[in-house]
Image (cartoon, helix red, strand yellow):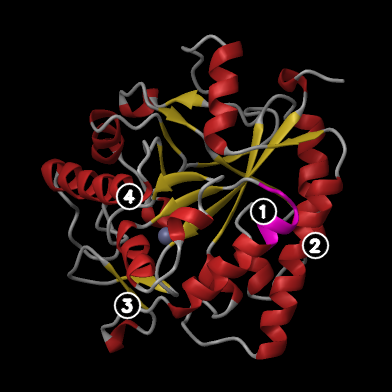
Amino acid sequence: MKKDSEILSVAISLDIDPDANCAVKGRYDALSSPVEQGGVRMDACKKGLLKIFELLDTYSLDATLFYEARTARELVNNGVRLQELSARHEVACHSLKHEDFLGVVSGLPMGDGVIVETVEKAKTILEKIFVREIKGFRSPYTRINRPVIKALEQLGFTYDSSETMPLGVEWQGKPFLMTAFDSNLLELALPSFKDSNGKKMTSYLWAIFEGKRVSLEYIDAVLWAREVAKGGLFIFSMHPWHLYTNYRGIPFSRERVMENIKNLDEVFSQLKQMQGINLIRQDQYLEDWLRREPVGIAKQ
Ligand SMILES: [Zn+2]
């Protein structure tokens, strides 16, 4: 049996946020598409999340759940037994109301103090709902800057998981310190890689649900990563709402939904059967890694 330091670890993560969410000009928080309607919907998120919990149970997989605090609260108010369903998974934070921290679309970059306040509020809400410590963070739109990273550090987070890095020669999926932002926070980055045609892809499964890729391409990526990222972590990510609605907020047909569920089932089933990988939650991977590697290893 190979040691963990010699095999690829694979994590499944969910960004649990409003249906087809979108940043909006002139406001910090996100709305559901089409934003002209001015609303926030969570029906598809709720259905998708319940379905994914079912699949995770079928394959006895433990995942990392990045909850937007607003969504978690709404689901609980809607009668979803979120605490119970999340019990064996890692609970992490995906902001308060899916803020556009950098102001890329809103045109309103958030100040250092407002960022701290917002993330603190989100963390407090999640800790109250789930009654446990929140260690991980993934930023909305996976966009971070120095104030966001500094806020996470100040609020006692252990790691961020928002960056996307090309997996391969330069980086083998290992955690690294956010020295680029003058911080000691650890980063568990998402991988990008090439498909068989040399086209760039990432580990977000959205392309499957939009009908642009098939599950086998993601399995091939893990088989490749198993060789080039020994001891590293390959993080999958997805949005629960994406099983039921497209990114414009248009509900998928029943057939399309069945297809999406089948594809996701296939990814989970293939991962479960794969030899020589270690399926693990992000927090547990990090804990193991900190135990065996000296901290202070910068981006490499
Ligand atoms: Zn999100």
3 vs 4, front mark:
4
Disc assigned to residue 266: 2
User: What is the spatial separation of the Cα atoms under label 4 and label 1, in whole angstroms?
Assistant: 35 Å
Q: Say which residue appears at 60% left-offset and 86% top-offset.
A: 252
In the image, 195: left or right of 102?
right
Q: Quadrant of the N terminus?
A: top right
Please provide the residue range marked out in magenta: 55-61
Q: Earlier in the sequence, mark 1 or mark 3?
A: 3
Query: Residue 228 in the image: x percent, y percent?
Result: 77, 31
Mark 3 lies on residue? 40
Few, some or many residues within 10 Å of mark 3 (<14, 14–19, 20+): some
Contact check, label 3 and label 2, Cβ < 8 Å: no
The residues tagged by marks 2 and 4 sit, at their Cα atoms, a distance apart of 31 Å
Identified by mark 4, the residue type is Leu
At label 1, the amino acid type is Lys
Q: Secondary structure at mark 3?
A: loop
Residue at the disc numbered 1: 200
Residue designated by label 4: 126
Ligand 1 occupies quarter: bottom left
